[in-house]
Image: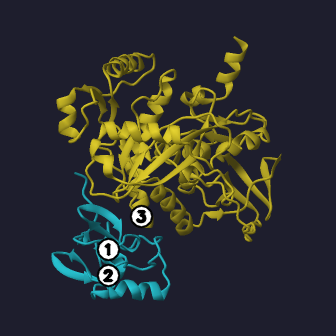
Chain colours: A cyan, B yellow
């Protein structure tokens, strides 16, 4: 999860990883978490809470607060801070509780 | 759930102005329901509770308000359970009016699912036998075939052969119930004394003196409702109450949109979307701090067979809690013969029976006498079995 700055800089120098966030193309640094990519692209809220449906965004960035849940490639309730971006990944905001199909 | 804390006993445990009208030992759902009911008629009521070292079945239960299946071998228990389900709406309404807490009572019927034809046959036989008992108050029940079940529970898995349905069953949110009762204490000036376990009980001239780490409390009436502690506390008022722990394990799934509107004995969805899978039963002593994979695996497997869509809903927590079991599984209600005014109240269905405990049992305790028809719940039933 945590990296030496030099390592992060080396990854940043490489080709961008392209993902989609709510239908918009977003270019990210390789090695970034989805949560970091959301922040870097100017998005602070990534979901609406299950019961009250009020906005929430990544907070702890280390996998414990569960405030950064998003739908990734169709799978709901993924922790954005614990998931690395990957080429072609589709990230969607979660509105309220997830569905059961 | 049994984690010690370093907190000191409640500082205000000294008797302020003499003698309480009633003192309840136990601040879980059973003790709290009784204390709530006592306060409707008595001025000065106190509740003694332990701290987080307590076993606290009230924090670990499933929250069913359940009638079907109960009372095989003691019809009176079914009748008592039915009466509790019947007064539950009044309790829920009162609590909401007094505290603003909605305990999320839903009494829209409940299901017992059968996963093969033997289970269907067994269920029909069981329910017929239950209803045919002398003294039983029969209620509506129906064995649903697959199609009827699918109307009530869309998405039921192919393994589900049928289900037993009754209109009487329901659910509540047990944590909200506990919170509502305790909020009512604060509002109605019931002295709730946490981290203040009863250590000794003396009875002189119609007054109970209960020793606690915070001092001695005195009361004219005493209710022993402290779960697994009842064995020791009841002994001090001359009653032999042979309760034992029976472990249950629960799996919690993440919150989803509400899709299960009819609860199942082993699977329910909470008002805020979480799922509980439960109803395991183990004789495992007092170990409430472990969960075991074989049991959890079986619980999860049956839940997924009941509702295959749960297959990719994540489990977010598991826990164990200890039921307070009597030898025959039925509640024990009795007044002490040697210390009149002391009552023991113990059961493993603190949510289902909350209505009856608050609105039916508490008035009996205030009157100083349990109703005649409560006699099947006394400990005499254990002595008879021993003698025969």
Tell me where residue B361 appears, x and y as whole percent: 55, 42
Q: Which residue is identified by label 3? A: B101
Mark 2 or mark 1, earlier in chain: 2
Dot 3: element: loop
Q: Quadrant of the C terminus of chain B?
A: top right
Disc 3 is attached to a residue of which chain? B
Q: Is residue B297 shown left or right of residue B18?
A: left
Residue appearing at x 25%, y 50% in the figure: B259
Q: Are marks 2 and 1 in contact (CB under 8 Å)?
A: yes
Tell me where residue A38 appears, x and y as whole percent: 30, 81
Task: Tell me, for residue A37, which label it has, or none.
Answer: 2
Label 2: few (<14), some or many (≥20) within 10 Å? many
Disc 2 is attached to a residue of which chain? A
Mark 3–mark 2 distance (CA, rounded to whole Å): 41 Å
Residue appearing at x 78%, y 50% in the figure: B207
Q: Which residue is identified by label 1? A: A85
Tell me where residue B76 appears, x and y as whole percent: 49, 26
């Amino acid at each position: 999860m945590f990296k030496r700055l030099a390592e992060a800089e080396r990854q940043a120098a490489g080709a961008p990883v392209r993902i989609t966030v709510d239908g918009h193309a977003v270019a990210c640094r390789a090695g970034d978490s989805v949560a970091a990519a959301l922040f870097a692209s100017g998005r602070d809220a990534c979901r609406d809470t299950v019961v009250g449906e009020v906005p929430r965004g990544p907070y702890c960035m280390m996998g414990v607060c569960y405030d950064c849940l998003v739908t990734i490639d169709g799978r709901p309730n993924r922790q954005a801070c614990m998931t690395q971006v990957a080429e072609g990944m589709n990230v969607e905001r979660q509105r309220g509780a997830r569905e059961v199909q | 759930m049994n984690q010690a804390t370093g907190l000191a006993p409640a500082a205000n445990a000294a008797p302020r102005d003499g003698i309480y009208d009633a003192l309840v030992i136990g601040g879980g759902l059973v003790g709290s329901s009784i204390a709530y009911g006592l306060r409707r008629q008595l001025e000065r009521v106190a509740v003694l509770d332990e701290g987080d070292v307590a076993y606290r079945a009230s924090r670990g239960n499933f929250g069913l308000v359940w009638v079907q299946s109960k009372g095989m071998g003691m019809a009176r228990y079914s009748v008592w359970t039915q009466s509790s389900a019947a007064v539950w709406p009044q309790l829920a309404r009162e609590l909401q009016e007094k505290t603003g807490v909605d305990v999320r009572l839903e009494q829209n019927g409940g299901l017992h699912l059968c996963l093969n034809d033997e289970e269907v046959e067994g269920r029909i036989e069981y329910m017929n036998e239950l209803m045919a008992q002398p003294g039983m108050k029969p209620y509506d029940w129906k064995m649903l075939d697959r199609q009827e079940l699918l109307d009530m529970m869309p998405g039921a898995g192919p393994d589900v052969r049928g289900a037993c349905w009754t209109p009487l069953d329901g659910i509540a949110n047990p944590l909200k119930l506990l919170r509502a009762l305790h909020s009512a204490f604060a509002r109605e000036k019931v002295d709730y004394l946490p981290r203040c376990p009863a250590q000794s009980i003396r009875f002189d001239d119609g007054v109970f003196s209960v020793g606690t780490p915070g001092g001695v409390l005195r009361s004219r009436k005493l209710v022993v409702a402290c779960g697994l502690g009842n064995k020791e506390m009841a002994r001090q008022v001359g009653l032999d109450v042979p309760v034992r722990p029976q472990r249950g394990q629960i799996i919690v799934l993440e919150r989803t949109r509400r899709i299960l509107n009819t609860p199942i004995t082993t699977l329910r969805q909470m008002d805020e979307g979480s799922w509980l899978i439960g109803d395991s039963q183990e004789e495992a002593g007092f170990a409430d701090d472990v969960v075991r994979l074989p049991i959890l695996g079986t619980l999860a497997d049956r839940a997924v067979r009941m509702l295959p869509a749960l297959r990719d809903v994540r489990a977010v927590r598991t826990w164990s809690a200890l039921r307070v079991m009597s030898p025959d599984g039925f509640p024990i209600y009795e007044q002490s013969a040697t210390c009149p005014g002391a009552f023991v109240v113990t059961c493993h269905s603190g949510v289902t029976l909350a209505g009856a405990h608050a609105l039916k049992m508490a008035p009996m305790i205030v009157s100083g006498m349990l109703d005649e028809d409560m006699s099947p719940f006394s400990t005499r039933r254990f002595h008879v079995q021993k003698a025969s």
